[in-house]
Image: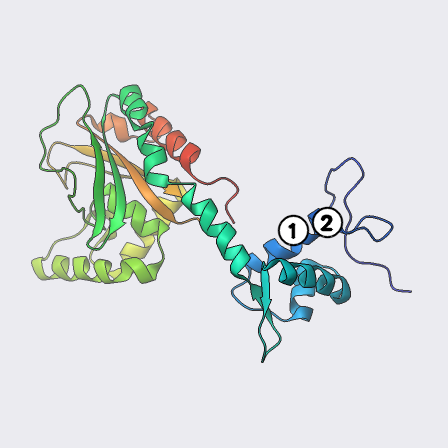
Amino acid sequence: MTADPTPHVEVSGNVTGRPRETAGGIQSLDAALWVLTTMARLDGAVGLSDLARACGMPASKTHRYLASFINAGLVRQNGRSGTYDLGPGAIEIGLAAINRHDFVNSVADRFSELTEETGLTGLLCVWGNSGPTVVRWIRAANFIVTSLGLGSTLPLLSSATGRVFFAWLPETITEKLMHEELKRARASGRVIGEAGSGVKGARALAARVREAGYATVDGRFIPGLVAASAPILDWQDEAQAVVTLIGTNPKDIEPGSPAIAALTRFCAEHSVPDRG
């Protein structure tokens, strides 16, 4: 008789591998949720054998879980292909979770704490129709004169805010704006900082920003001002919002500075944990 390849959950509750049913044929909630979360991580509808293989459990066992999920509306089976996908019940749960995690409002509630801690002016930006858009603005005690304000849109490649969106949004969203900015730069003979004036340089810049976890710019964008930005990340590791600190002292944006530490910590606290 072939041994069940599915790793088990110890009685103490410490998971030693993928969950399985407990002895005696009683369905394990951990095992059932493992099937559901595995489906969520796949690209689309999946056949029974492929899903069972991805879950590391027998097809017969996987099928029993799927039957229960179909009864609950969490999974649907496509009539012609017989493949399985997430159902309306799963969509309802997902939408409810998203609606209860309002990235902008949750950040805005404590935004002033960050500006008070750092002494820097703060911007909260989201991705709008024209690119990075300012939706919150908190001025520091040391007033900064700038044309930026609510509703202002920022460049993708030459602003710290834009660079973070560029690094943490899908290329399909940022590609058009990237090409427009590179085209204008080439026409004027201008180099966009570390991005240069070509696609390869821009992509390399995005990779460096992701590796660092934040982006900075000096006074080339707004003379006399420096900025640092970090992302508020969602379940898909994409930037739902970007927090930016603006000041006049270049030391504030140096690696390891108190302002950078406070910024990245604040954004990590407001991002969705355990992404992916």
Neighbourhood count class around disc 1 (C-alpha, 10 Å): few under 14, some 14–19, many 20 upward: some
Q: Nearer the viewer, residue 84 or 43?
A: 84
Residue at 38% of width from left, 46% of height from top?
210
Q: Is residue 76 left or right of residue 144?
A: right
* Furthest-right residue in this view: 1
Tell me the amino acid under the disc marked 2: Pro
Residue at 28% of width from left, 22% of height from top?
118
Residue 138 drawn at (x, y percent): 21, 28
Q: Is residue 224 left or right of residue 85?
A: left
* Furthest-bottom residue in this view: 80
Total numbered labels placed on residues in the image: 2
Residue at 36% of width from left, 34% of height from top?
106
Residue 18 in view (yes/no): no
Residue 70 drawn at (x, y percent): 63, 63
Q: From the image, tell me which residue sits under label 1.
A: 33
Q: Is residue 126 left or right of residue 221?
A: right
Residue at 40% of width from left, 43% of height from top?
233
Neighbourhood count class around disc 2 (C-alpha, 10 Å): few under 14, some 14–19, many 20 upward: many
Tell me the amino acid under the disc marked 1: Leu
Residue 247 in view (yes/no): yes
Q: Nearer the viewer, residue 28 or 172?
A: 28
Examine the rendered structure and indicate whether residue 244 appears above or below residue 180.
Answer: above
Q: From the image, tell me which residue sits under label 2.
A: 19
Q: Nearer the viewer, residue 173 or 99?
A: 99
Q: Quadrant of residue 52?
A: bottom right
Residue 252 drawn at (x, y percent): 26, 26
Q: Quadrant of residue 142?
A: top left
| Sooner in the amino-acid sequence: mark 2 or mark 1 | 2
Examine the rendered structure and indicate whether residue 117 appears above or below residue 76.
Answer: above
Q: Quadrant of residue 220?
A: top left
Q: Are marks 2 and 1 in contact (CB under 8 Å)?
A: yes
